Amino acid sequence: MCKKLTAIGHNWKGILKQTVPFLGLIVLVILFGLTTKGRFLTIRNLTNIVSQAAITMVAAIGCSFVMAHNNLDFSLGGACALCAVAGIVIGGFTSYALMLPICIITGMLCGLATAVLHIKARIPAFMAGLCIMFLGRGVAQGTYQTFPMSLPKEFKVLQNVWFYLGVVVFVFVVAYILFEYTKIGKYNKLIGSNPACAALSGVKVNKYKTIAFLISGCTVGIAAFMTIIRGGGVGVSTGSSLETNVLLALTLGGLPLTGGSGTKVRSAILGGMTLFILNNGLQLWGMDPSLIYIVKGIVFLGVVYISIERGSGRVMT
């Protein structure tokens, strides 16, 4: 009898943890909808939130593959800046029609470099990512003063919410298929759950880790292109805090920090929207920027405290 009650308790606890990201998002929408005198629910404000969150969500979708095998990719911000600079500079010398492919190729090269440093040089992935981040940021900042970084006029037509929303939907659908219906997602989740078991099962661990970093690099390249469009070019703040926003978004979306079978791509969407809705709502309240960071930190801590599974260090979805 006690065992049955314990099992029921664990089931309800698991259900609660799975619904926390959804409930959090719904609560924030209702809260800000009722307390901002209608300003939060205006079409203009909602489209602004989507436009802001889109870049983080796209980068977070790719990063989900890396986190699935229990690694963190801290190269995102610097890699984004490097991709943006490469896209707009090389595009200027060749054709701006190549800007997106150049951004994607540069991002994948950054992902490959991180994978090589992690796998071949046996450097922890987060340290390898930091190296790429600083390298990318340094190269990007050294280039700002040399070449024009303004968005070409023909691309300004893309500065609308439908472009950002369309990119997010496309990237999510492709990533979902790869994550749920191919070996790429299944094997990376298996590696995150138990790398030794994965290796003994015949999984080529290093191969699928590398693929995960390449996918993350690809989405960073897409995010860099979106950053160029949204910002009207490239500047000092391009890619700034992207890695932090991605980590916050994935955690708020319920993605396990230690990867494994509980990893879901939807965490990027849920967490990204939650993060930017929270930030937008607090601004509409007129809260001081310094206090906004404090509130975001408290909310982040609260979500982790509720969702973490003690004993294994997992954040459950």
Image: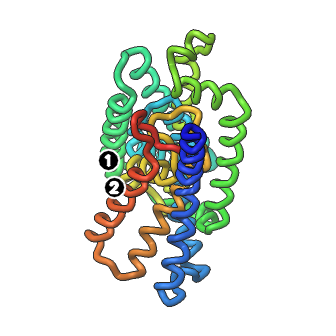
Q: Label 1, label 2: how many angstroms apart (C-alpha)?
A: 7 Å
Dot placed on the residue nearer the N-terminal end, 1 or 2: 1
What residue is disc 2 on? 236
Quick one: label 1, few (<14), some, or many (20+) residues within 10 Å? Answer: some
User: Tag 1, which secondary structure?
Assistant: helix
Quick one: label 2, few (<14), some, or many (20+) residues within 10 Å? Answer: few
In depth, the one of 261 and 100 nearer the eye is 261
Colour treatment of the image? rainbow
Q: Is residue 297 above or below residue 45?
A: above
Task: Give percent across and percent down for residue 131.
Answer: 32, 32
**Count of picture labels:** 2
Task: Give percent across and percent down for residue 228.
Answer: 50, 56
Q: Is residue 297 visible?
A: yes
Q: Is residue 232 above or below residue 68?
A: below
User: In the rendered view, does 302 fall on the left or right side of 13?
Assistant: left
Q: Quadrant of residue 78?
A: top left
Q: Quadrant of residue 2?
A: top right
What residue is disc 1 on? 141
